[in-house]
Amino acid sequence: RDNGRTWDHAIPLHAEPGWISSPVNGLKVLPDGTVLMVIGKFKRTINPETRYGLEMFNTFSYITRSTDQGRTWSELVPIEKFWPYWVEFYGTNDPFVLDDGRLLFCIQRTREDNGVGWEAAVTTTSDGGQTFSKPVVIASSPTIDFNDTSLARLDDGRILALIRTEQPPF
């Protein structure tokens, strides 16, 4: 209420013993004023025999919304899991509002269990996150993992994706 000089106490939107929960896409204010957040819930264990020394399993994504500038939030609504292994809604500036009003979300997945074969993809929703389109993979390689996508709109209307990689040439 004072341009960010002071803040109210934090309000946890989701906490569950034994699970890691994360606001994977940050907050997004939609054109109608609704504040949207995607929350990821997952488990990880240390396993030195896997690609990144982690065993990643049990991933779930939820969406919650606020219509009063974040004072109160809806119940978490599960988002369909598009693939069988690791699936994560993750984009540093998601959702991205398209010219036709749809919301574009970046997601990432693994083609195999335990962090093998990361691919970057996108999906859209035209109903504020109630349903999502079939994902479109935008970066995939048998030797390079792609994740953590950021989007930018160019002056000519095209969308540029910047995607982090784990292996050379980075």
Image (tube, rainbow, N blue to C red):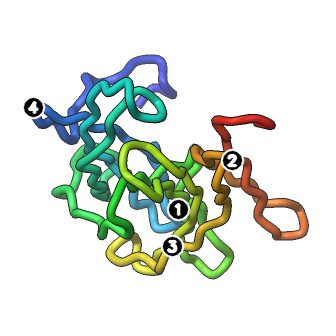
Mark 4 or mark 2: which comes first in sequence? 4
Q: Quadrant of residue 98?
A: bottom right
Look at the numbered discs 3 and 1 and tell me whether their residues touch, using CB distance below 8 Å: no
Amino acid type at mark 2: Ile
Marks 3/2 in contact by CB < 8 Å: the verdict is no
User: What is the secondary structure assignment of the residue under circle 1?
Assistant: strand
Q: Residue at 74% across / 54% down in the picture?
A: 152
CA distance separating discs 3 and 1:
9 Å
Quadrant of image for the N terminus: top left
Label 2: which residue? 163
Q: Which residue is mark 4?
A: 17
The label number, if any, that marks residue 135 in the structure image: 3
Q: Can residue 43 be seen by looking at this rendering?
A: yes
Quadrant housing the C terminus = top right
Is tag 3's residue or tag 2's residue first in the polypeptide sequence? Answer: 3
Q: Position of residue 109 (x, y in %)?
A: 47, 55
* Distance in Å between CA atoms under marks 4 and 1: 28 Å
What's the amino acid at mark 3?
Pro
Please identify the residue farthest to the front as the structure is shown. 49
Residue that label 1 marks: 105
Label 4 vs 1, first from the N-terminus: 4
Badge 3 density bin: few <14, some 14–19, many ≥20, Cα 10 Å:
some
